[in-house]
Image (cartoon, rainbow, N blue to C red):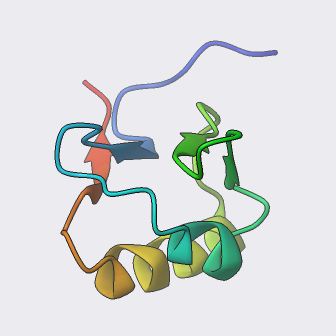
């Protein structure tokens, strides 16, 4: 595993806002898996082109706006 570089983007989740619906895992299965209660576990890896497209779809579809894309500093 390599170090993250400034400017790279990663998918994050606000666990307080999340309701464990699981839409994100369906839209971005390579980035998100769910635990036994249905809450997301997101990949810490930087997003590549395909991952960014799937992450954006999951962010847009999240009914509680709990997902976001974070740019590393």
Residue 22, compared with residue 39, is above or below; it is below
Q: Position of residue 24 (x, y in %)?
A: 53, 70
Residue 51, compared with residue 57, is above or below; it is above
Residue drawn 68% across the image and 39% down it: 35
Choose top left, top right, bottom left or bottom right for residue 43.
top right
- Circle count: 0
Residue 23, compared with residue 38, is above or below; it is below
Residue drawn 63% across the image and 81% down it: 27
- Left or right, residue 72 beside residue 22: left
Quadrant of the frame with the C terminus: top left
Choose top left, top right, bottom left or bottom right for residue 41.
top right
Residue drawn 46% across the image and 69% down it: 21
Q: Position of residue 5 (x, y in %)?
A: 48, 25
- Residue 52 in view of the camera: no
Residue drawn 59% across the image and 31% down it: 44
- Left or right, residue 67 beside residue 9: left
- Left or right, residue 3 beside residue 10: right
- Left or right, residue 14 beside residue 20: left
Q: Position of residue 9 (x, y in %)?
A: 42, 47
In the foreground, 4 or 64:
64
**Residue at the far front in the pictured view:** 37
Residue 15, compared with residue 18, is above or below; it is above
- Residue 25 in view of the camera: yes
Q: Position of residue 40 (x, y in %)?
A: 54, 47
In the foreground, 58 or 4:
58
Quadrant of the frame with the N terminus: top right
């Amino acid at each position: 595993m390599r170090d993250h570089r400034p400017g790279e983007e990663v998918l994050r989740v606000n666990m307080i806002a999340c309701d464990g619906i699981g839409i994100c895992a369906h839209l971005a299965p390579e980035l998100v898996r769910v635990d036994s209660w249905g809450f997301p576990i997101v990949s810490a890896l930087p997003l590549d082109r395909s991952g960014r497209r799937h992450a954006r779809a999951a962010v847009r579809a999240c009914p509680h706006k709990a997902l976001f894309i974070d740019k590393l500093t």
